[in-house]
Image (cartoon, rainbow, N blue to C red):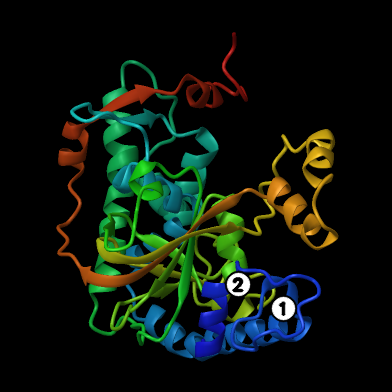
Amino acid sequence: MPTDKIKSIKQVAKRKPLNAKKVSEKAPSRRDITLKHIRAHDVNRAHRVIKMVPTLIAFYKKLEPMQIAALKYYKGPGSFFQSMLLANYSNTKKGEKRELPFPFRKFMDTLFYRDILGKQKMEAIYELELPSATNFEKYIDQSYGKRVELLNHLDSVYDRPDCPKLTGDEVVFRGMSDVGPAITKLKPGDTYTFKNFISTTLDRKVSENFSGGDCVFVLTGLKDIPFLYMPGGKHQGDEPYTKFLTDISLVWDLSELTLPRNLEFEVTSVERRNINSGWRMQDTAQIGKLLKTLKNTGIESEEEIIENELFPKGLFIFAKLKTWLPREPLSFDKIKKEAKFVLDKGALATWKGKDDEDD
């Protein structure tokens, strides 16, 4: 990404008044960003993706079947699962065991064993039977255990010496919603470790949508860090994974680069600014309140006041890689010992042919 574009990202929140006589070309305000800027950004993003694809196709063709299964799983429901399992963003109090829900909803298990592992493996490994009090422990061992096994296979992909690596010139974005104080209280000089695999994107717009209006990490300094490109789309069990790399749409793809777990970053700056998230508009904004606020203000500030009311400011956290911390293989026995498994009655009801639990 060009240096002047990076600077504009960092300074884009500061807006010029409508009657500004001169606008700096190095730091255009959001109001001054034209269709030309947007087109240049998307052309640059598409160019990076196109250059990556041939290398990635050659690399993915060398992977073992279970490594490919791990990629498919992460792109599907696995991303959320591994965040819950490894990062644990919940409000678990210190000293308490974290809670892990079970069973998975039936359609999620069906998808996992049919589309991720393939129909034959599904029949050989696991039978989709109704979880009950007599087999809960068996179900947990099989369903959680098999998913943890796939995460270890994903780890092994990043450990390959031929895994593609970033140059260090990239700027990638990660949008996060419903973040806790461990993130909202970050300040310059603090460090933050992503204990889970993390999805990032070359497209800032995508990260803002995934943030839900809450938080966007802007990550740099990723020299020699291995990465995987996750093409959008549904991956059927036995279809060639590399097919999706040439079939993806440059318009609708997420430009997703997935990075390994245990990356530690140092925060360089924290800003609050409007996040252009299509997922969150402030539903408490009232016309009466806005009329009172605007009564004694000039026309130059009206648009900004309305925008701030409709779209509350979110966090932009700029961080540079500090180190890639050592990893150990994930142990399901250890996870099981440190967690409390909680019955999800709504999910159990789906195994009985119901959408929701009966009252």
**Which image quarter: residue 245?**
bottom right
Q: Which residue is mark 2?
A: 12
Split into 4 quadrants, where in the image is the C terminus? top right
Crowd rating for badge 1 (residues with CA inside 10 Å; few <14, some 14–19, many 20+): few
Residue displayed at 75% across by 86% down:
36
Q: Which residue is mark 1?
A: 33
Q: Amino acid at mark 2?
A: Val
- Cα separation between marks 1 and 2: 9 Å
- Closer to the chain start, of discs 1 and 2, is 2
Above or below, 41 against 332 in this view is: below
Crowd rating for badge 2 (residues with CA inside 10 Å; few <14, some 14–19, many 20+): some
Residue 155 image position (x, y, % from top left): 26, 64
Residues at circles 1 and 2 in contact by the CB criterion of under 8 Å: yes
Q: Amino acid at mark 1?
A: Ile
Left/right placement of residue 183 relative to residue 12 reads left
Residue displayed at 17% across by 47% down:
331
| Residue sitting at the far front | 296
